[in-house]
Amino acid sequence: MSTEEIRAVRYHAYGDESVLQVDQVDRPTPTAGEVLLTVHAASINPIDTYVRAGAAGVGDLPRTIGSDVAGVVTETGSDVTDFEPGDRVYGTCRGVIDEGTIAEAITVPASVLAGLPEAVSFEAGAAAAMTFATAWRALVTRGGLGLGDRCLVSGAAGGVGHAGVQVASAAGATVVGLARPPSQKFVTDLGAEGVVDYRTTDLAGEITAAAGGSIDVALESHAGANLAAVLAALARGGSIVVIGEDEPISLDSDLSMTAKQADADLRFMSLVASAEDQRPLLEAIAPRLADGRFEPGIDSRFDLAETADAYRHLAETGVEGSIVVQVR
Ligand SMILES: NC(=O)c1ccc[n+]([C@@H]2O[C@H](COP(=O)([O-])OP(=O)(O)OC[C@H]3O[C@@H](n4cnc5c(N)ncnc54)[C@H](OP(=O)(O)O)[C@@H]3O)[C@@H](O)[C@H]2O)c1
């Protein structure tokens, strides 16, 4: 067993960014079915902050933070046949029930990883993992988005949203994103036909005007704030896939009537809870990253020692795409 020490960004108590510290820990050893990764890049996602705040209520402290990872396999545990040392890989959804990714080396079940093509940088892999896998699973797998559909992407300048605009455009949909004015050009440059400020007083009206009609599939990251407007903008039989809510989602009798009249399909989805889909999604995304059909936006880069600053930046408005932690 190795006794080499590595750096890991961990928290010993639940709380805000101030609980994060860089610890020296023993390099982990892969058990059966796991690989040891030398981490090159990780990225920052809102779910990390919920877990760090204690919301998930699982796992022992101290814990390493971080969900997304891209790196190189350096060792394989027994029963691992699909990867070997030297393979470039990427993965997501660590750090919730397992240890997180912002460390110089981590162990990960091989079954949730996918190969990362040479043409894709480690930072692009880390930036794309949760964002594109979530957007694809929400819009295509759960939402059934297809050619010619009108699609709404909430939070369109953010991590998942900026991926959602690209996934929906690639599927042949007409895309409208929700974003504040400073980020609207970023969203149209990604392929959205229209962008609406989510703070407008007539959100439903502006969405349908920008889309040229009612919405067939909506990816909703702020369902507490937007559900009523998105239901009002929905085509008959349309789908809303909820991936997040900024405030409690309430469905009073008026809103329920609107939903029934639209024959609305209100769906929820969690990538973390869909471990069986993570590798197939990442395998489908990888060649699209390699040939440029999908391009993760990198808002900013931080070193491992600056991870707390990276999370402070995530909490600010105006982030465009993903925030990356460069580990090597
Ligand atoms: N269910 C799942 O599997 C899953 C997976 C990944 C993420 N999520 C959740 O999805 C949400 C978004 O994740 P993310 O990584 O994209 O976060 P992010 O990078 O922080 O992006 C959030 C975006 O939403 C915008 N926004 C803020 N208030 C809004 C509103 N009322 N309506 C529409 N957009 C609004 C923000 O714009 P400003 O710059 O103006 O603030 C920002 O661009 C989070 O709650 C996250 O936990 C869920």
Image (cartoon, rainbow, N blue to C red):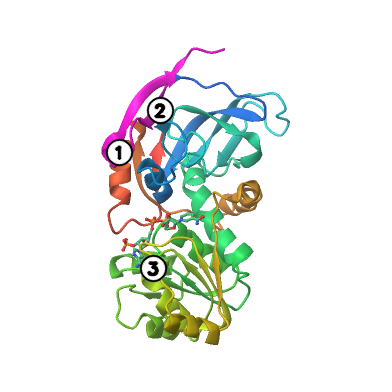
- On the question of residue 211 being in view, the answer is no
Residue marked by disc 2: 8
Q: Above or below — where is 123 with respect to 182?
A: above
Instruction: Please check the rendered image and state whether residue 296 is part of the magenta-colored stretch, yes or no.
Output: no
Estimate the x, y position of residue 125 in percent, counting from the top left: 52, 44
**Type of amino acid under label 3:** Gly
Q: Residue at x 73, y 31 (%)?
A: 81
The magenta-colored residue range is 1-25
Estimate the x, y position of residue 298 in percent, counting from the top left: 40, 50
- CA–CA distance between discs 1 and 2? 12 Å
Foreground label between 2 and 3: 3
Q: Which quarter of the rendering shows the N terminus?
A: top right
Q: Earlier in the sequence, mark 1 or mark 3?
A: 3
Residue marked by disc 3: 224
SS at circle 1: helix
Callout 3 crowding tier (Cα within 10 Å): few <14, some 14–19, many ≥20: some
Does the beta carbon at disc 2 come under 8 Å from ligand 1? Answer: no
Q: Quadrant of residue 73?
A: top right
Q: Above or below — where is 286 with respect to 168?
A: above
The reply to whether the C-beta atoms of the residues labelled 1 and 2 are less than 8 Å apart is: no
Front-most of residues 90 and 27? 27
Estimate the x, y position of residue 184 in percent, counting from the top left: 35, 69
Front-most of residues 124 and 142? 142
- CA–CA distance between discs 2 and 3? 35 Å
- On the question of residue 309 being in view, the answer is yes
Callout 2 crowding tier (Cα within 10 Å): few <14, some 14–19, many ≥20: many
SS at circle 3: helix
Give residue 327's mark: none
Residue marked by disc 1: 308
Q: Which quarter of the rendering shows the C terminus?
A: top left
The reply to whether the C-beta atoms of the residues labelled 2 and 3 are less than 8 Å apart is: no
Q: Is residue 74 left or right of residue 55?
A: right
